[in-house]
Amino acid sequence: MKTNRRSFLGGVSTAAVLTASGSAFAQKKYDDGATDKEIKIGHTNPYSGPASSYGVIGKGLEGYWKMVNDRGGINGRKVDFITRDDAYSPPKTVEVVRQLVEQEKVLCLFNTLGTPTNTAIHKYMNQKKVPQLYVATGASKWGKPKEFPWTMGYQPDYHTEAVIYAKHILANVKDAKIGVLMQNDDYGKDYWGGFEEGLGKDIGKVVKRVTYETTDPTVDSQIIQLKDSGANVFFNIAIPKFAAQAIRKIADLGWKPMQYLNNVSSSVASTLRPAGIENSQGIITALYLMDPTDKQWNDNADMKTWSAWMDKYMPGANKNDGNYIFAYSVAFLMEQTLKKCGDNLTRANVMKQAANFQKQRVPLLLPGITVSTSPTDFYPIQSVQLASFKGETWNLFGDIQSAEGS
Amino acid sequence: MEQFLQQLASGLANGAIYAALALALVMIYVSTDHINFAQGEMAMFSTYISWQLMSWGADFWVAFVAAVAFSFVMGVTIERVILRPLHSAPVLSIIVVFIGLLAIFNSVAGAIWSYLIKSFPSPFPKSDFGIAGVIGAHQLGVVLVTLVVLGLLFVFFRFTPLGLAMRAAAQNPQMARLVGVRVDWMLALGWGLAASVGAVAGIMVAHIVYLDPNMMGGILLYAFASALVGGISSPGGAVAGGFIVGVLENMVAYAGNQIEKATGVYIIGNGEKLTVALIIVIVVLTVKPAGLFGRVVVKRV
Amino acid sequence: MPAFPKKWLAVLLVLAVVIPLLQPVLPDIVSNYRLFLVSTMIIASIAVLGLNLLTGFNGQISLGHGAFYAVGAYTAAILMDRLNVPYWATLPAAAIVCFIVGYLFGLPALKLEGHYLALATFALALAVPQILKYKWLEDLTGGVQGIVLLKPEAPFGLPLSEDQWLYYFCLVVMVFLYWGAANMLNSRSGRAMMAIRDQPMAASTMGIDLALYKTVTFGISAAYTGIAGALSASAIAFVAPDSFTIFLSIKFLIGLVVGGVGSLAGSVVGGIFYVLVDNSAQALSQFVRNDLGVPFDLSAYTVFGVLLVALMYLMPMGIVGGVYLAVRRLRSQR
């Protein structure tokens, strides 16, 4: 009887809201995917296929929502996290996302992974007016509230990061002759675009740029070409496997350029250790997350909480894998977003709350880096800090940097 | 000139990788007439076994021998359990089974050992091996190991009764059966040997490309091309084919690089080196359809 | 294998036309998503039919039909994006382009047989995504970014949703193409095609021009798959090199073999399987974990692999072949 009356009352209040629009304060309002009991969130991830190393992000997110549900959910609502495999294939993403939106009727998508895959559903999500929040790609195209008001990124975009490296090279390396290794896809292109912009009129300092395909067994041949070009600065735009190969090959060849490594491969466990700690000394990268292998965070409260969460919800998982750090931090932000929505769980309000963070602290971000968004700023994290590799860890240096108004 | 030498050396080193896996492909082809698309993933799985043993404290060579032995058993088991019942199935169905095996090995390895790349030790000491600045110790080691495996196979097939029986079973099963060779066990042995050779390839490759469940993805194609260039039924041809493909690929990139340097116009580069290398391979095959070292089989009418 | 009974074919077609119209009555069952899913099955079945014409009926193996699918999709996308050609007009264009590409590829392929042809086609499938990114083609293909397109809408103000319209459009194309294929296979040329597959020597002594038939079959096969690619460009409204990896070609091959080599009905089954298997593999792995309570995390990819091996075990001749055998066995027992 009780539930009946409640749903009846709910019906009345929605009707009241519809007639007296505007006075919706503290009323329960729901779109598809939200009820008194649960909130449905959709997610896609390449659990199979060549990009399957990212699958752990999906697993990590699942573990996070399990923890949220174990402590009572968000404002009393359990999170129903539905994750689907898209094998990193754009047509498959379209298919599973349509299933999530139209059949499962999720409230929003969260942290869908990959640039081409998110591009394939970009328009669709905005036509359907379903939030596509905190996508797991650093492309710079996810922060355009005017054209795409339903899509928002999360991490610092590749473009901004590359601008910062370019500025650092110009300020610190005399007579720089730069060699660039990049993956031949839109991730590589995005970095390269930022790098070009950052160098500006000094673009001529890039003496050689070579690409690789993810089907290449090694990038040895490319590194030989770069060395031959006489470069004294090396910008490494590669995913961990190839970034590590490049660093090791450079050491094998006895080439000693100043090395810049993209954040994508900044994980100590998956890039620098395989490349050889001794070969990695002095490499510069830009960071925004803590590295799980870095001892300087051992006593950090966030790191301790994270570690306890890993033990409880991800038993047996590799704690050195930085993807779990990423998953935890982005899921935290999503949780905050939904918390702020209160009982007004409409898609419009989810977007409104997502675009309304002021210096929000998110665990596992580097000290001093926070999340800020606004209706015109759809880039949650815009700051990074440069770090150079010394001993077995990254040593942060300089101020926290952000690209001006991207 | 320095670049040319380095590209050549790196091409040879990559070629040795392709050659090692191509050898495994040839082993199965010779005994069963199939091209095993799961060969790369099987080799990857074997490599994980040796990695696991080492992480439990085993010595490199102990883990190596154990993994090779394990792979032999694995190969024999797969042939007996999965392929034997499909003996009379059409070729395309067998290919689908291989793709299924590929998916299973890949995903099970991912589930057990995660997709995070792992570094893999090299047995070749850095100091005494290799030529500084041109080729690394491990890469030279891989070339040598590949040649040693080829030599062992040659000796096995030429000079041992078992090797002879296996060749007989593959070339003329009915006659072999008449003289008392257990033909179906010979097929299983072929699979076992192929899996062992694959394990050697995987263990050699893993130091170079790092160990992860997808490490053989790209390499399998090159091995496939190498085996065909050399003539799919000839182990020596497969090794030669591997070196040819490896060097060819680097030379395409090198040539493109030189052209761009000289003329300033980009024509081919790293993005196209695979395509160009494959086109060359295919052109060679249209001229010599049985591969460079393959025997031409005369069709009977 | 016997032809599918005409009576049943008619019933199926009527159902295929009528069911989507029930959307206003049964919005949850005949949803736009399901119609879209069926459209992707139709598209896949056309692609598999293309492969079947070559591999199943003419005996030339191809591991690279994804390449023709990509060429078709890009032809359509570039025409729509650059020249504002309407989506329906891109199909014949894609067919012509792919026919030419397929015919030309068929010329060197004449010299290659069996595994060598498999390698050559495999190489083609690998090369195409790289060619799409080639520096001098980037302006046309959009390079690594690909091309974002608009979804076709129902013409003449028909009261159909985009997905309903897409479905009917695909259905008409499919019926037309299957009808064409069936007629071709029943003609003199079709018998020649199959004779080449079964008895190449005998065929050539009987005066069949092997080279001509083989290359033209290659062209037609590529054109069929290319049309499927063009349809997919409209359906997905996005093309990018990442959509056409080697796995696409492999999945077409799986569709072909699982459906039934050398059978038109098999191509349809193969197309359905191609789309369904991913979804069902994930559902199955979740079922094993959540409902059966198996603690081991069985990934969808594992289930997919086991499914393939099991299917080949049970029905080495594909689903259509297996069903046919089962029916015949049942009948003979009576």
Image (cartoon, coloured by chain):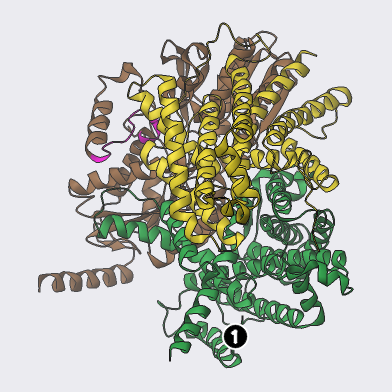
The answer to whether one can see residue A375 in this image is no
| Disc 1 target residue | C4
- Which residue is at the front of the view, B112 or B43? B43
Magenta span: predominant SS is: loop
Q: Residue at x 79, y 67 (%)?
A: C200
The chain containing the residue under callout 1 comes to C
Colour chosen for chain C: green
Q: Residues within 10 Å of mark 1 (few under 14, many from 20)?
A: few
Name which residue type carries label 1. Phe
Residue C67: percent from left, percent from top: 70, 55
Of all residues shown, which one is farthest toward the front? B179
Q: Residue at x 27, y 70 (%)?
A: A16
- Please indicate whether residue A339 sits to the left or right of residue C33 in the image: left
- Please indicate whether residue B77 sits to the left or right of residue C154 in the image: left
Residue C222: percent from left, percent from top: 74, 63
Colour chosen for chain A: brown
- Which residue is at the front of the view, B223 or C167? B223
Question: Is residue B28 within the magenta segment?
Answer: no
Q: Which residues are magenta?
A: A313-324
Residue C108: percent from left, percent from top: 83, 53
